[in-house]
Image: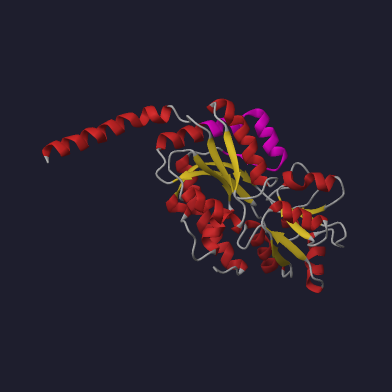
Amino acid sequence: MQRLTVALTLALLAGIAAGPSWSQSYPARPIRMLIPQPAGGTMDTLARMVSNQLVPVFEQNIVIDNRSGANGIIAGETLARAVPDGYTLLYTSASLANNQLVHKKLPFDALRDFAPVTQVTTLPGYLIVTNPQLPARTIKDLVELSKTARVLYGSSGVGNSQHLLGELLNSRAGSGLVHVPYKGFALIVNAVLGNEIQILFGAPTTVVSHIKAGRMRAIAYTGARRWSGMPELPTVAESLPGFVYEASWHGLFAPAATPPAIILKLQTEIAKVVHAPRMREQLESGGHVPIGSSSADFGKFLKAYFKDTAEQLRIAGVKPE
């Protein structure tokens, strides 16, 4: 019995001693990065931008794994079941928290089963975009039109931040916008282009080319201040005083119990990437603001975000299903 105890103790000490060296050698093989949407969406685009900059730093490939569907739940479950060794990561958005609050039963708990690595960016606002055939050129026009005509808006699923924005507009302005869920933002874009639906809420980087080409019309921005990329475009608050909607955020997660040294290494390198001048310029031109926060700060942010979003869902009348 005594020999067994000594052997177990020596094995434990060896594991502790090996931990730092193992973390220093990370990554020793390609990393899989889960994206909870199809290729072409905002998360996918930015995740690839960040990954491309990390590859030469880590000297390993980062394989993008698009796990779309169920508003990100499939990707979240995949991460929760992954080995906590830093080789499976999840790049996701605020929809992670929305899922937790909207669905009564999920196969994971984001605060329990995920280790926050870093908040990569924040998106201060959405562009409210319409099909050009819609006879509404301002928020007031849209509100009035939706009271007498069927005006559809798309989101990437029930409880998604886009869905929440639409219901908050209905609650605050008395509009009658009708929600249509899709399985990814690219599908929403196609639906607006084809006039299948009339409204979408999008990050500037995902819709600005369509706006410039005349295929879509921007009528407002939901941020606290006008977006620098379209300074002529009014904010929603200019028509509805006090209405500000910070669109979303992007963050990186690892499975719970991932070694802290690996979390720190990922966070440190991502912070360098997003704050590099060229990357910062690319992010800001698309309406995003680089963050690169510590794991601890991201964890605090998440707890506050869950609380605030639960209140928004209550106001919008979106109940758990």
In the rendered view, would you say 231 is above or below 312? Answer: above
Residue at 81 percent across and 73 percent down: it is: 148
- Assign the C terminus to one quadrant of the image: bottom right
Residue span colored magenta? 269-291
Identify whether 67 is placed above or below 164: above
| Quadrant in which residue 10 is drawn | top left
Q: Which residue is at the front of the view, 96 or 28?
A: 28
Q: Is residue 252 magenta?
A: no
Residue lying furthest bottom in this view? 148
Q: Is residue 278 magenta?
A: yes
Q: Position of residue 187 (x, y in %)?
A: 73, 55
Q: Residue at x 78, y 54 (%)?
A: 190
x 55%, y 59%: residue? 99
Would residue 256 be found to the left or right of residue 1 on screen? Answer: right
The front one of 218 and 141 is 218
Q: In which quadrant of the rendered image does the N terminus lie?
A: top left
Residue 301 falls left or right of residue 223: left
Quarter occupied by residue 263 = top left
Examine the rendering and report whether any part of residue 241 can be seen.
no
- Percent across and percent down for residue 113 are 44, 51
